[in-house]
């Protein structure tokens, strides 16, 4: 289990049916050793681990501390659309957060901003292997949109790491948080009426699903830049494949982009690239 990753929360309540909502792990406080109950620092939990963490839900739920009611104070977390249980948990108490934070409704909304620009705001999310050409393709599309008089903006995975995400590394946890920040930034730009182009490796299917759900159905288009691995290795623009040479290339393939054609849904767009040429836009 990873902080920042989205799961499904299911709680069995007495006489109240089956409550099922989205949940994310905000903070993993520590792992608990079952033999001594010692608290051990941890960044993730594996199968069989016991841990203490803060979680946040997308909807309020009725609950009681586990010590008062074992049914209302327990829950199960699922992956894969709710079919794969990954953890069971008990609730000690609610997080003590401010209750006076409200969403500020603006006087000018997305519809008005889009109408003033004469366009339909959306996100074009380019994903693919390192060296696949996704940033190059996204930049060409952005340039073409600008030439057509459209209002667009490109968020590049490397560029945001110089500022917004400069505190993040490349662990699985940091990649998940990087995607979350990119998605929320893109969402704000869509609210401003812009066409947003995002170029990001985006290796995790569950996080891509969460990103998609942050937008209205017609606002999000995922584009898989399908470049053969050998072409990406030959380009190796960042030296990643060279540094993971020898027997470690398999690790790189799994960690960077565990994505297969079987995982791509029908709603995805796919751009097949063998040789990419850059042409001038008049």
Image: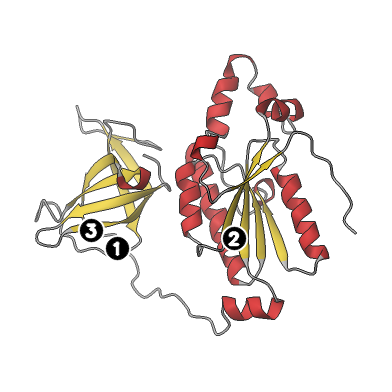
Q: Nearer the viewer, residue 62 or 147?
A: 147
Q: Residue furthest front?
A: 266
| Res. 19 mark | 3
Front tag of 3 and 2: 3
Q: Is residue 38 above or below residue 4?
A: above
Front tag of 1 and 3: 3
Q: Which residue is mark 2?
A: 186
Distance between mark 3 and mark 2 Cα atoms: 30 Å
Q: Earlier in the sequence, mark 1 or mark 3?
A: 3
Q: Is residue 281 above or below residue 266?
A: below
Q: Quadrant of residue 21?
A: bottom left
Q: Earlier in the sequence, mark 3 or mark 2?
A: 3
Q: Which residue is mark 1?
A: 96
Give the residue at x 44% y 45%: 206
- Mark 3 touches mark 2? (CB < 8 Å): no
Q: Secondary structure at mark 2?
A: helix
Horizontal relation, residue 114 to residue 216: left or right? right
Q: Is residue 78 visible?
A: yes
Q: Quadrant of residue 276?
A: top right
Q: Quadrant of residue 120?
A: bottom right
Distance between mark 1 and mark 3 Cα atoms: 23 Å
Counting from the top left corner in percent of width and height, residue 62 is at 20, 64
Counting from the top left corner in percent of width and height, residue 64 is at 15, 59
Q: Residue furthest top?
A: 246
Question: Is disc 1 surrounded by few (<14), some (14 to 19) or many (20+) residues within 10 Å?
Answer: few
Front tag of 2 and 1: 2
Q: Secondary structure at mark 3?
A: strand
Distance between mark 2 and mark 1 Cα atoms: 30 Å
Counting from the top left corner in percent of width and height, residue 30 is at 32, 40
Q: Earlier in the sequence, mark 2 or mark 1?
A: 1
């Amino acid at each position: 289990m990873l902080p920042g990753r989205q799961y499904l929360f299911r709680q069995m309540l007495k006489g109240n049916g089956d409550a099922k909502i989205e949940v994310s792990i905000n903070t993993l406080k520590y792992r608990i050793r079952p033999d001594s109950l010692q608290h051990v620092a941890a960044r993730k939990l594996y199968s069989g681990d016991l841990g203490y963490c803060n979680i946040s839900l997308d909807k309020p739920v009725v609950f009681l501390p586990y010590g008062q009611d074992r049914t209302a104070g327990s829950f199960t977390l699922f992956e894969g659309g709710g079919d794969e249980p990954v953890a069971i948990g008990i609730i000690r108490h609610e997080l003590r957060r401010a209750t006076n934070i409200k969403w500020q409704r603006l006087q000018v909304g997305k519809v008005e901003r889009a109408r003033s620009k004469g366009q339909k705001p959306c996100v074009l999310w380019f994903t693919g292997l390192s060296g696949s050409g996704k940033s190059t393709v996204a930049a060409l599309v952005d340039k073409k949109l600008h030439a057509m008089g459209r209002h667009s903006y490109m968020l590049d995975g490397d560029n945001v790491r110089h500022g917004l995400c400069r505190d993040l590394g490349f662990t699985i946890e940091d990649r998940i948080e990087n995607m979350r920040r990119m998605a929320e930034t893109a969402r704000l730009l869509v609210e401003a009426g812009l066409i947003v182009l995002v170029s990001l490796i985006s290796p995790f299917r569950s996080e891509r699903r969460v990103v998609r759900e942050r937008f209205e159905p017609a606002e999000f288009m995922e584009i898989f830049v399908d470049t053969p691995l050998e072409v990406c290795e030959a380009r190796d623009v960042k030296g990643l494949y060279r540094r993971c040479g020898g027997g470690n290339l398999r690790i790189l393939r799994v960690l960077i982009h565990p994505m297969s054609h079987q995982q791509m849904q029908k709603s995805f767009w796919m751009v097949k690239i063998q040789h990419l040429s850059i042409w001038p836009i008049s």
